[in-house]
Image: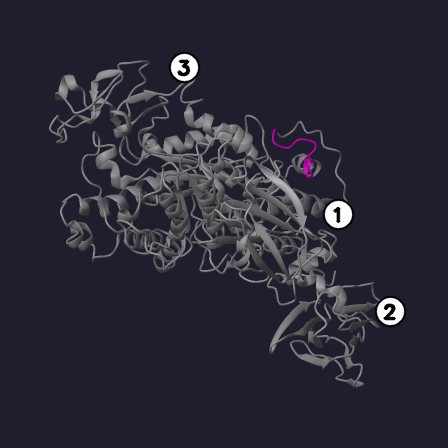
Amino acid sequence: SPTPTPPPGQGPALAIDATAARHPISPDIYGLNFASEPLAQELRLPVRRWGGNSTSRFNYLLDTTNTGMDWYYENIPQANDHPELLPTGNTVDRFVEQDRRTGSRSLVTVPLVGHVAKRRTAGHPFDCGFKVSVYGPQQSVDPWDPDCGDGLHTNGTPVTGNNPLDTSVAVDAAFVQGYVAHLVSRFGDAAHGGVAYYNLDNEPMLWSDTHRDVHPSPTSYDEMRDRTITYAAAVKAADPTAKTLGPVVWGWTAYFWSALDWASGGNWWEHPQDRLAHGDVPFIDWYLGQMAAYETQHGQRLLDLLDVHFYPPGVALSGAGSAATQALRLRSTRLVWDPTYSEESWIGQPVYLVPRMKQWVADHYPGTGTAVTEYNWGALDHINGALAQADVLGIFGREGLDVATLWGPPEATQPGAFAFRVFRSYDGAGASFGETGVQAGSADQGVASVYAAQRTADGALTVVVINKTGTALTSQVTLAGYAPSGAAQVWRYSSANLAAIVHEADLPVGAAFSATFPASSITLLVVPGDLDDNLRPSLVTVDTQSYSGGSSNANGVLEAGEQVVLSPSWRNVGPGAQSVTGTLTGFSGAGGGTFQILDAASSYGSVPAGQTRSCTTTGNCFAVGLGQPASRPAHWDVTASEQLGSGRTRTWTLHVGGSFADVPASHWAYVGVEALFHAGLTTGCLQNPLRYCPESLLNRAEMAAFLERAKHGPAYVPPAATGTLFADVPASHWAAAYIEQLHADGLTTGCGQNPLRYCPEQQLTRAEMAVFLLRLEHGPAYTPPAGTGAVFSDVPTGYWAVSWIEQLFAEGITTGCGGGRYCPDQPLPRSEMAVFLTRTLGLTLAE
């Protein structure tokens, strides 16, 4: 008879609070290096990197690179069907073309090392850095070209005194500026769909090994600063809208010291010459301080993201290994976040990589993003590697990393690819993990880890649970701040089926429930429902029968004669509810109305702006509107308390004084959002209750709809789309008609040419918004006065949108993002868009 399946073991308790620790999750943490087009298409890959040692010496003019120490320092011409067209059609051009087809942002490495491959020679023998015929016998030679050696004499000592021009031509910042300008000419700048990110070379602290034939000297603190400033300035000159990433160092040692420090050998860390010459300040701390000092002095930010590589010792770039290695792989994901976990081999101390990076930035260069453009936990062909990869992606999102690209992407059929599918397309049709992270914790993350996020599209709560053990586990799950509207969908990838993510039977869920997670599995729960704003219908009743004027208004705003009744009916909380408290706050100089406590028959009269009146009762309270004030009368806050036993109390607070459940009157953008709503220019992002999603980032498709309604009126319906204008906007796209009409109205020319594209899913930046708004206000032919570069410290005269941004400031539509900055390349949340648009249109709440 078959061996019976053992019963599940007791798993750690899992707790989720959908109202706590809410934060945006950057989509760019789900990136890959060199992903294939089918996999990128399937994953809706957000960002793809062109990096690695060979990119350090890529010559875009000749479509040729040098392999460095990876393969005998050889120049290798890249496969190209039309070399006569170069530089058009080079390898990076084709890389970016693929990214345009899959909607991925491109991250391209530019050379800082000072040399690139000098010529394109088809077939062996290739140019190489250490020819045996020139520099004598060597330890190893290319089996296909025995004249190309590894640069080591037969006794193991390095060959010295070679000529860098054997393989390469010396280049400077002008070469990099030309490289970026070429990409801009082909694909537009970053703000209009071109290359989004540029790596400032690759692992420069290893150049004296990886590219020893052209850079034999160990890299120092000063060289890193000087090359960054020189070459990053060249990138910004060619594309001010692109983001730069540096110093792109290889790993732990390079975070704290330079190659010049460890070049002396021995116990070099006891007397690190370069670090001591720089005040004994660790390298990255010093580097960020130098970048900040440059911006202070010159008014230009040259470094946008701090970028490091990290390969966990003992497991990276390896197979699954023994049981002990597999256990280490799953433990070592703690290196990404846990300050109490010491790396178990040569590092020998806590790494807590992402929090450490964020602290570096906070201490030395605030406003800088964080990126890990190479990492690998190994075993991507095994369920053990898939578990670790899913864990790392969950941690990246929870800890707030901005960009991450896995080195060595898995094949589409390998388990590692399914780890990405769980977050990016678990159903095979683009359904994804949420974009707004929320608090999720496990009583033992080493046994089972949990990550949670809310999805903007439908408000669903998405929860990933990773069982890292070889035994099925049953855990108790508590769910706070979220009221499920039905059973949860269950999607699972596990050792039981390595070929698919399986859609299993729905799971009944509530404030507390039990769930079983199979051995070695990744489980995604998709919980339908809304945040606790959906308590509102239970707590607040608008008496629409008692109107004497004004419009029907179920949002808590008191119109003339309207009653707002608070009743502790507690549909969504337990029977232990004890009381309800209502607070009416005056919002305008006209006051708010009459406030009464029904069961006490008392009245406080009108409520002046900025003052509050409250009631607490186990019965009903209600407020009655006095009359129609000049602008906004009041808002109504409701607090309900529920006794949970053992002396514990749960408190629920709702705001019902505005049109949207997630934009209370205390929200900084309340006036703009409300004005937009009452002008008929938005109906929000979700219903039941009505929400605006103020912190969601606006994309170009959404902006097209806003602009067209603003131009033609709230009821405007554009002509049917043809789907033939923009290559990336088919007629089936929800915003296709708005986008094509935006072009017809002269408000956009798209984001790139050859073919014409609009980049509908690309996040709108503050700089792009300036152009859209001023064209909307003044007409498509409008050209603003020339910019001076003196208004905002981060918008110099050379910035592509400087004149538009300064005109936006001159018209009082913006005051910047703080500290004398405008943050032109920062994505635009819907809240900011509401404020900008209402200012541009001159809308007020009275309208």
For the residue carrying disc 1, how many other residues have a C-alpha within 10 Å: few (<14), some (14-19), or many (20+)? Answer: few
**Residue at horizontal 34 percent and vertical 43 percent from the top:** 311
Dot 3 and dot 1 residues touching (CB under 8 Å): no
Q: Residue 84: which disc?
A: 3
Residue 304 showing in the rendered view:
no
Residue tagged 1: 713
Q: Earlier in the sequence, mark 3 or mark 1?
A: 3
Side of 223 relative to 503 (left or right) = left
Q: Give the residues in magenta.
A: 727-736
The overriding secondary structure of the stretch rendered in magenta is loop
Using the image as rendered, state which of residue 658 and residue 618 is in the foreground: 618
Q: Mark 2 belongs to which amino acid?
A: Tyr
| Vertical order, 692 against 77 (above or below) | below
The local secondary structure at tag 1 comes to loop
| Vertical order, 84 against 772 (above or below) | above
Q: Mark 1 belongs to which amino acid?
A: Gly
Q: Where is residue 531 drawn, in percent x and y?
A: 65, 59
Side of 617 relative to 234 (left or right) = right
Q: Residue 374: which disc?
A: none
**Residue at horizontal 24 percent and vertical 16 percent from the top:** 145
Residue tagged 2: 547
Query: Is 522 contained in the magenta span?
Result: no
The local secondary structure at tag 3 comes to helix
Dot 2 and dot 1 residues touching (CB under 8 Å): no
Side of 577 relative to 550 (left or right) = left
Query: Is 735 contained in the magenta span?
Result: yes
